């Protein structure tokens, strides 16, 4: 009966594990519901922000703001290259499937692509991205590891301020953000997007596509400016950048909770299948043990006769 006792112990252990993964799945599902709701709500605000920019895109050539300046990476007389900043948004905890792996791989690919023409500096949002970058020998100049599950604009103010101030001061030529775009509870897509400088051509393209779209009948208003238009654009551009950072962090948060919920669901399902398999093995071992005992009893009775 030693074999059956060992199997019973394993079944009990797997059942306890299943209880833990099921509880984690329910917690992640609750957090995911709130995160997705917040993400979808902020998408509407982000869309209106883009609509406002596209409505003034016809006057984009008149705008003089560092966020719109296209800087070409060139080596100076000392041979020192321009700096490029990549903001990596990851999670603080694991057990979320391939969520962190995908965005880290996307970041490493971008680093390899840009390393020939720029010095790459990393700002990490989340402990997993920080440890992954340090593991491959990439220096992380700043880490934000205290982001709450429900992120507010106030929570990303330090990150946003750091990016905008360093870019306006000329420290960085380009700023990218690596994040995970929330598609659905079953699908999350790692993305890397150029945050700064804002592409004038891209804004004009968005305007043309918006006007020519058959899915949208919106007539984009043209605004009249009183006073200095550049002052207004400066405030608008900085709010847009802050909103884009906020939206990307929200997308990543919703993706993280969705990935964790699915990972825990898969773990619970796998535990259930393992319990069924172990139960079958246990029944076979028990049946074999009983059959053996019956055979021994029969053989003993036959020898007495």
Image: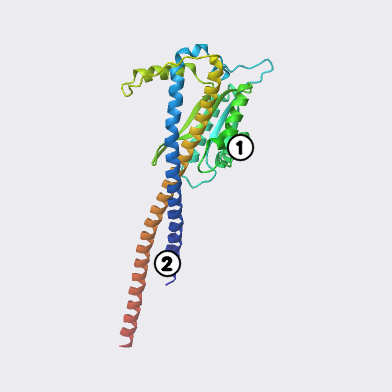
Quadrant the C terminus occupies: bottom left
- Nearest the eye: 219 or 212: 219
Quadrant the N terminus occupies: bottom left
Image check: 107 left or right of 275? right
Image coordinates for residue 193, horizontal then vertical, percent: 49, 27
The residue lying furthest to the top in this view is 62
In the image, what residue occupies the spot 57% across and 30% down?
160
Measured along the vertical axis of the image, is residue 42 above or below residue 269? above
User: Tag 2: Cα neighbours inside 10 Å, few (<14), some, or many (≥20)?
Assistant: some
User: Tag 1: Cα neighbours inside 10 Å, few (<14), some, or many (≥20)?
Assistant: some
- Lower sequence index among marks 1 and 2: 2
Mark 1: secondary structure: strand
The residue lying furthest to the bottom in this view is 305
Please say whether residue 259 is visible from this viewpoint: no
Q: CA distance from mark 1 to mark 2?
A: 46 Å
Q: Which residue is mark 1?
A: 143
Q: Nearer the viewer, mark 1 or mark 2?
A: 1
**Colour setting:** rainbow
Tell me the tag on residue 8. 2
In the image, what residue occupies the spot 50% across and 40% down?
100
The residue lying furthest to the front in this view is 226
Mark 2: secondary structure: helix
Please say whether residue 55 is visible from this viewpoint: yes
In the image, what residue occupies the spot 31% across and 81% down?
298
Measured along the vertical axis of the image, is residue 139 above or below residue 73? below
Measured along the vertical axis of the image, is residue 259 above or below residue 57? below
Image coordinates for residue 10, horizontal then vertical, percent: 44, 63
The residue lying furthest to the right in this view is 78
Measured along the vertical axis of the image, is residue 297 above or below residue 190? below
Image coordinates for residue 127, horizontal then vertical, percent: 57, 42
Image coordinates for residue 272, horizontal then vertical, percent: 38, 57
Image check: 71 left or right of 4? right
């Amino acid at each position: 009966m030693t074999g059956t006792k060992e199997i019973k112990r394993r079944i009990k252990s797997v059942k306890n594990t299943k209880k833990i993964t099921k509880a984690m799945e329910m917690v992640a599902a609750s957090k995911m519901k709130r995160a997705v709701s917040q993400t979808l709500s902020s998408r509407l605000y982000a869309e209106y922000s883009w609509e406002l920019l596209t409505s003034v895109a016809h006057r984009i050539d008149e705008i003089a703001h560092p966020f719109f300046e296209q800087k070409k990476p060139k080596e100076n007389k000392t041979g020192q290259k321009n700096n490029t900043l990549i903001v990596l948004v990851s999670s603080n905890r694991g057990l979320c499937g391939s969520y962190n792996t995908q965005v880290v791989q996307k970041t490493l690919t971008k680093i390899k692509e840009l390393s020939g023409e720029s010095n790459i500096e990393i700002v990490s949002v989340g402990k997993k991205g920080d440890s992954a970058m340090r593991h491959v020998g990439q220096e992380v100049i700043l880490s934000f590891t205290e982001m709450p599950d429900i992120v507010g604009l106030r929570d990303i103010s330090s990150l946003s301020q750091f990016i905008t101030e360093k870019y306006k001061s000329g420290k960085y030529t380009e700023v990218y953000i690596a994040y995970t775009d929330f598609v659905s509870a079953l699908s999350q897509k790692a993305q890397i997007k150029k945050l700064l400088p804002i592409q004038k051509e891209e804004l004009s393209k968005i305007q043309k596509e918006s006007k020519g779209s058959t899915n949208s009948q919106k007539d984009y208003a043209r605004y009249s400016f009183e006073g200095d238009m550049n002052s207004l654009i400066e405030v608008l551009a900085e709010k847009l950048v802050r909103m884009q950072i906020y939206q990307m962090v929200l997308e990543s948060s919703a993706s993280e909770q969705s990935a964790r919920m699915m990972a825990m669901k898969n773990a619970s399902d796998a535990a259930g299948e393992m319990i069924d398999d172990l139960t079958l093995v246990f029944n076979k071992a028990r049946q074999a043990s009983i059959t053996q005992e019956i055979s021994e009893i029969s053989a003993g009775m036959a020898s007495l006769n």
